[in-house]
Image (cartoon, rainbow, N blue to C red):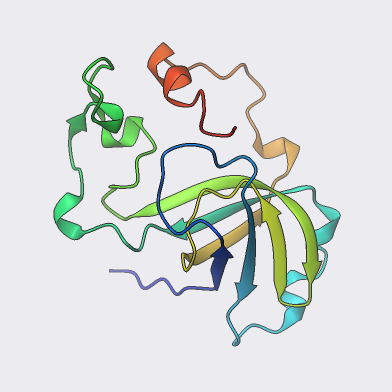
Amino acid sequence: MYTIYQIGTVTTDRKDAVDDYWGEVTSIIEMDERFDESCLDGIDSFSHLEIIYLFHLVDDNKIQYGARHPRNNPEWPKAGIFAQRGKNRPNKLGATIVQLLKREGRIIHVTGLDAIDGTPVIDIKPVMKEFLPAEEVKQPAWASELMMNYWK
């Protein structure tokens, strides 16, 4: 058994978990008050961050453990929950790479975070080129179709 604590909270205009149009969304992440602002020292030397967060509003009864059609679209093949990025995951964890706009003390401003207002942040990591895939990224056609409007 593990215990994971929230380190911050998302503030944004997005109140609902809508499937598309996250690209222009700006969000603020405020660190929990138990963290001194020095926890973010040096973060503004990175252009992008990876935000790990909790899908806190997902009902336990809607968690997926097997395969399903992504977005419940029968035109796409069934894929296991770990072969898609849906929010109804067993541990309710989301991860997104965002652009860092600025830092102000214990607050960071980002764009492209697909999390709604009030979302608990579990971790923040700087994006380093060396952690990105060196090889070409491969994915099925349905994934590209699903993501067509996600970041617009």
Quadrant where the N terminus is found in the figure: bottom left
Which residue is more in the foreground, 150 or 31? 150
Q: Residue at x 22, y 22 (%)?
A: 78
Instruction: Kindly identify the residue that appears in the image at 74 percent across and 37 percent down.
Output: 129
Residue 21 in the image: above or below residue 148: below
Q: Which residue is drawn at 36% across and 73% down?
A: 3
Query: Could you tell me which residue is drawn at 62 percent across and 67 percent down?
Result: 29
Number of numbered markers = 0
Report the front residue among 39 and 101: 101
Q: Quadrant of residue 24?
A: top right
- Residue found at the very far left of the displayed protein: 61
The image quarter in which residue 137 lies = top right
Drawn side of residue 82 relative to residue 18, left or right: left
Q: Picture coordinates of residue 146 (x, y %)?
A: 42, 24
Front residue (pair 132, 120): 120
Q: In this view, does 146 lie above or below 99?
A: above
Name, please, the residue furthest toward the right: 45
> For residue 28, which quarter of the picture?
bottom right
Residue 98 in the image, given as x and y percentages of width and height: 65, 47
Q: In the picture, which quadrant includes the C terminus? A: top right
Image coordinates of residue 135 in percent, x first then y, are 63, 19
Left/right placement of residue 44 relative to residue 109 reads right
